[in-house]
Amino acid sequence: MSENSRPQQTDSAEYRKLRRKRQQHRRAVLKRRLALLCVCLAAVIVLIVVLVLKANDVFYKKADVSTLTVKSDGSIVLEEVVSVKDISTDEKDLKASLKKSIEDFNSGKTAAGTDAAGTAADSSGSAAVTQKDAEVRNGSGAVKLQKVSVKDDTAYVRTTYPDAATYAAYSGYTCYIGSVTGAKAVGYDFSSPLCPVVGTERGEAVSADTLSDTDGMQVVIVNEDIAVRVPGEISYVTANVASLKASDETAASGTGTYGTSVAPDTYILYTTK
């Protein structure tokens, strides 16, 4: 009887050993799955945090002065930094006013623009072809309001535009973005002297007629007091450019008359990167 039981005991021991191995394997698989789940959950949490921070503009480097940024595709990001100390408004009212203005423009109700402080702009005095072109786009829903904030009596507003024509129509200011040859073709005057630019240094003004390399360049033309950032290396500017920053290819236009039509046309010629 005892001899017959030995194989059964041996089989039982082997079975228990095999069972333990299976259990260990299951635990190892479960640990790996739990580890993978933790990694996935951590990735989701990080993604959510990044999206929340991005939605709150944590990663966006805001301009500290009113700046018009030209993108390589010709679109525009406008950042307006305007004092509202003497204006009775708060962030909620300002946002509502701007949303109404943009909605009216995008729906085709109006083509008249205002700045962040609510001041009407005037587009007279320069080639009007951009205004005419933009009237076709009026009603396309192209202008977008990205950010509005009011802090320490200063309003910050960021809006985007698909092209210079739309910006000109909405804001009321002259704006041309394109080739020098194209600007001449639609009537812009290049008879004013241009100053060569090297880094942040602006040289002595020379007659544009004596320059042979400008026709292959791009140009931004504005008639408001605003910093202009271009997607390339600035080569020439008109004499009314107040300052230059080589770090981000920004030229500050005008002489402190932001919000009025006093600022003369500013020409910023550049070569694309």
Image: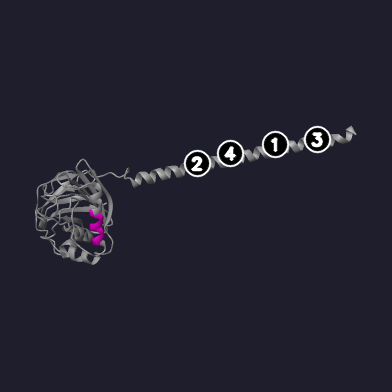
> Mark 3 sits on what residue?
10
- Of residues 233 and 186, the one nearer the viewer is 186
Q: Position of residue 258 (x, y in %)?
A: 14, 50
Q: Which residue is mark 1?
A: 20
First in residue order: circle 4 vs circle 3: 3
Point out the tag, 3 or 1, that comes first from the N-terminus: 3
**Residue shown at the point (89%, 33%) measured from the top left:** 3
Q: Earlier in the sequence, mark 4 or mark 1?
A: 1
Q: Main secondary structure of the magenta part?
A: helix
Number of numbered tags placed on the structure image: 4
Q: What residue type is disc 2 on?
A: Val
Residue 104 shown in magenta: yes
Sequence-earlier tag: 2 or 3:
3
- Rounded to the nearest angstrom, the CA distance separating label 2 from label 1 is 28 Å
Q: CA distance from mark 4 to mark 1?
A: 16 Å
Compared to residue 67, the image places residue 135 above or below, namely below
In the picture, the disc for residue 39 is: 2
Name the residue located 16 percent from the left edge and 51 percent from the top edge: 236
Residue contact at pointers 3 and 1, CB within 8 angstroms: no
What secondary structure is found at the residue carrying circle 3?
helix
Q: Is residue 259 left or right of residue 91?
A: left
In the image, is residue 56 part of the stretch drawn in magenta?
no
In the picture of the structure, the residue carrying the numbered disc 4 is 31
Of the pair 153 and 25, the residue shown nearer to us: 153
Give how far apart the Cα atoms at labels 2 and 3 are: 44 Å
